[in-house]
Amino acid sequence: MPPELFPRPAFSLTPEPGRIGPKLWVRRVVIWREPNVILQDVPLRPGFNIVWSPDSQKPDSPIGHGGGKTTFCRLFRFCLGEDTFAPDDLRRRIGEVFPKGWVGAEIVLDGDVWTVLRSLGHRRRDIVQAGGSLDNAFLEERKATGMASLIDAFTRSFMGDSPKLMPSSIGSEGAWKALLAWTTRDQECRFSHALNWRSSDSDSSSPVVNRSAEDKLLVVRAAIRGLSRDEVAAQQEEERQRKNAAGKKSHLGRLEWQLGMARNNLPASLKKQGMAPPGTPIDISLLKKTAADQLSKLLKLPEGVNPADVEEARRERDLAKEESDRFQGEVKLLAGQIAAKQETRSFIAGELPEAHARFINEKNPVCPICKVRIDKVLADGCHISTQTCDLYSLQMEISRKREQVKELEREISSLRRNEPTLQAEAARCKKRFDELDRALKTIEKSHDASSASVRAAQKVIEDVNQYEALFANYDRARSAAEKMGDKLEKTRTSIAKYRGSSSASITSLSNWFDVVLRELVPGDIRGFAKLDGNGLKLDVELGGYRSTVAIDSLKVVAFDLAILAMSLERSLFFPGMLVHDSPREADLSEMVYRHLFEFSAKLEECGPAPLFQYILTTTTAPPDRFQRKPWLRLVVKGAPAEERLLKADL
């Protein structure tokens, strides 16, 4: 390791102004065998809290494991909103042994107390109350409320906008439970990686189980204010584009394989020496011409008739027939219209002589009864006839009929003017249909008489057409894949830009990671936290680069404590709470373990009162001064049963 130009500063932490206590801490955890029958009443405090299950060194003494340390941590998480409190088998066994059992906690959030009661039996009941005390938990019957109000209070208190920045696999509704998973790691994860929080073996139902490291890193970055909405939107777009690009690439690969197979299946006689590069327009044109020439030679078709055009000829013949039939129908319709109008004209014209005669008679009328002239009747009077004569109406009727005849003659003339053009068009269409029909029959007749070799030649033409279609699809797919690749590259560039804007948070994390490592490991040690396109990387240099199981566990502990220290110094979307279940069993050395206790006590002194809550469980004996209050909060043993957390042999 090169010598440092400037010495690194010693540990120093200045709390955020106005901070007088933890944002969130648990004041008390109580476990009941049944209402009002207490199994454990564990008082906790702000600062460093130790749960110890002594691991005796004597061969005839019980081991510390099995005392209930992990169960205590699970019940602690359960009271903070996690869905389960033990692996499925153990949870069922606890429900059988304690069918009326309860666990409760007094939780202090921003100085206000919340009480939580959750049943341990098979009947699920959760009761949350703002205020109150566990001393009065069962004085009266209370209705189940669920845990939503408490989780909402946590979210409003210290999570800020971070729920909106959660990956889609977790969502804003799972934000608190994801953060809880990080701050209260599963013992089953063995402190193997900074982003390994929940094991599927613990049956926690946490939203982070089986989620990718990338998704969990977003939870961390959101909590330390190292993530922006713009970056989240860009990452979501990048994920969509990446899936799209992968799909296009896969599609392109399939087309490429199909294209190769299609070309390999073409007969060697088509792929002559000196032809254009495969897949080019010239290459495909030459293949099609060669295939068509081979089939024409076999069929001995008339000059200019291409055998590859059979389907096209049939389609054109059918279209010509439709057009011919349409014009023939229009000719018939026109002839019918002319005939109908001529008939109407003749009928109306036939009525005109009769009307004219009536008009003449009416002008010089004779009485139809007595055959006496009307003017005489009018002079002398007639007492027989009752009919009247309307000369005006007769004259108007004659004029109307004459106008109708003229209008019909005009319409007939107009229709007759269209008749030659329509008949000529119908004849043209009929001629075209006859020509196409004869050409098609010639080709079909040749095909019907063709041999197996002709059919094989026809198959070659089909294969060439398929090859052409495949290559067109391949070109389109390749163009689409290239465009999507360009879009994806631009999106990733913007993500890198947004990530760079959060460098202050990552730099602070890296500095604190280095500081915590020097507190835990005396000597010339250095730590670095880096964030790049490959995720979060924690490096340790101790006489050179180190990477062992023990170093990996050390990294995880130092990482968590670095975030805890950051949350005291500046406002983060982080509760200021940690639970480490048996880190010593994760292969931390005894020396590092001892310094871990000392550093935790040092953090308590960085304010007017402890500004955090850190709970650590252990089977290894704590350093002597930590084997008492205020740090030691609970002692359990693996045996006898009365010394265990639940005072029972499960």
Image (cartoon, rainbow, N blue to C red):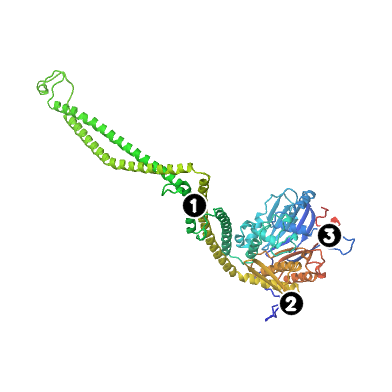
Q: Earlier in the sequence, mark 1 or mark 3?
A: 1
Question: Which mark, residue 291?
Answer: 1
Q: Nearer the viewer's eye, disc 2 or disc 1? A: 1
Label 3: how many Cα within 10 Å (few below 14, some 14–19, many 20+): many
- Amino acid type at image mark 2: Asp
x then y, percent, for residue 626: 80, 68
CA–CA distance in space, label 2 to label 3: 39 Å
Q: Do the residues labelled 2 and 3 touch (CB within 8 Å)?
A: no
x then y, percent, for residue 413: 24, 39
Q: Does residue 167 appear in the picture of this structure?
A: yes
Q: Do the residues labelled 1 and 3 touch (CB within 8 Å)?
A: no
User: To which residue does mark 2 refer?
Assistant: 524
- Amino acid type at image mark 1: Ala
Residue closer to the observer: 167 or 130: 167
User: To which residue does mark 3 refer?
Assistant: 637
Residue closer to the observer: 399 or 591: 399
Q: Nearer the viewer's eye, disc 2 or disc 3? A: 2
CA–CA distance in space, label 1 to label 3: 89 Å
